[in-house]
Amino acid sequence: MREQINADLKVAMKAGEKNRVGTLRLISAAIKSADIDARPSGKDKISDEDILGVLSKMIKQRRDSIEQFTSGGRQDLADKELAEVKIIELYLPKQMDEAEVKKVVADLVKEVGAESPKDMGRIMGALKQRYAGQMDFSKASATAKELLK
């Protein structure tokens, strides 16, 4: 995945796509930062699965910023953040819709035998392991809480 991002960065630089170049550089920097953070645990580079987590985190940060900029009357900055989200999303797998998330969470609750909110950790851990980058985990968490009431 990191090779694809670097190749796309070179193409964007040659094409003079400033916004795309900036976003791809941000992605590369976030991945390198995660690589550095992983060194104490004995890893030189994070896995593609971990990269998906980094990208998901970047999208979440930008969506929060979009909300702040929109409420603050700064539509120009919100539009810039939205453009970055669209570029980052190109590197994530297809996102599950709400119905798919509900089905996956319900199936997983049955699979692990979860019965109470105390089992949330096991459910969320399994979801993040199996579906990294494919769903919004805050929505999945809300769905799981609803099922475990």
Image (cartoon, helix red, strand yellow):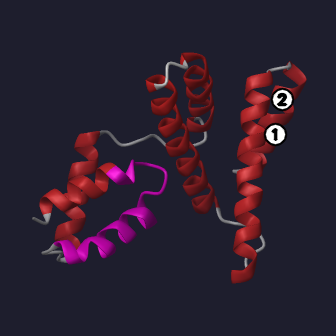
Quick one: 44 or 58, which is closer to the camera? 58
Query: On residue 7, which mark appears?
Result: 1
Residue 88 figure quarter: top right
Where is residue 72? Give x, y as percent: 49, 24
Which residue corresponds to mark 2?
A: 11
Where is residue 58? Give x, y as percent: 58, 46
Quick one: 113 or 41, which is closer to the camera? 41
Q: What is the CA distance from the residue labelled 1 to the residue labelled 2?
A: 6 Å
Asked if residue 42 can be seen in this view, the reply is no
Element type where label 2 sits in the image: helix
In the rendered view of the protein, which quadrant contains the C terminus?
Answer: bottom left
Residue name at image x 24 percent, y 66 percent: 108
Q: Amino acid at mark 2?
A: Val
Residue 47 figure quarter: bottom right
State which region is magenta. 117-138
Q: Is residue 27 left or right of residue 90?
A: right
Residue name at image x 28 percent, y 49 percent: 101
Number of residues whose C-alpha sits closer than 10 Å to that of mark 1, classed few (under 14), some (14–19) or many (20 or more): few
Q: Amino acid at mark 1?
A: Ala
Q: Is residue 60 left or right of residue 144?
A: right
Where is residue 63? Give x, y as percent: 49, 36
61 part of magenta stretch: no
> Would you say the magenta stretch is mainly helix, strand or loop?
helix
Instruction: Name above or below for residue 75 compared with residue 148.
Output: above
CB within 8 Å, label 1 to label 2: yes
127 part of magenta stretch: yes
Instruction: Name above or below for residue 92 compared with residue 72.
Output: below
Element type where label 1 sits in the image: helix
Instruction: Name above or below for residue 123 compared with residue 17.
Output: below
Residue name at image x 38 percent, y 54 percent: 137
Query: On residue 88, which mark appears?
Result: none
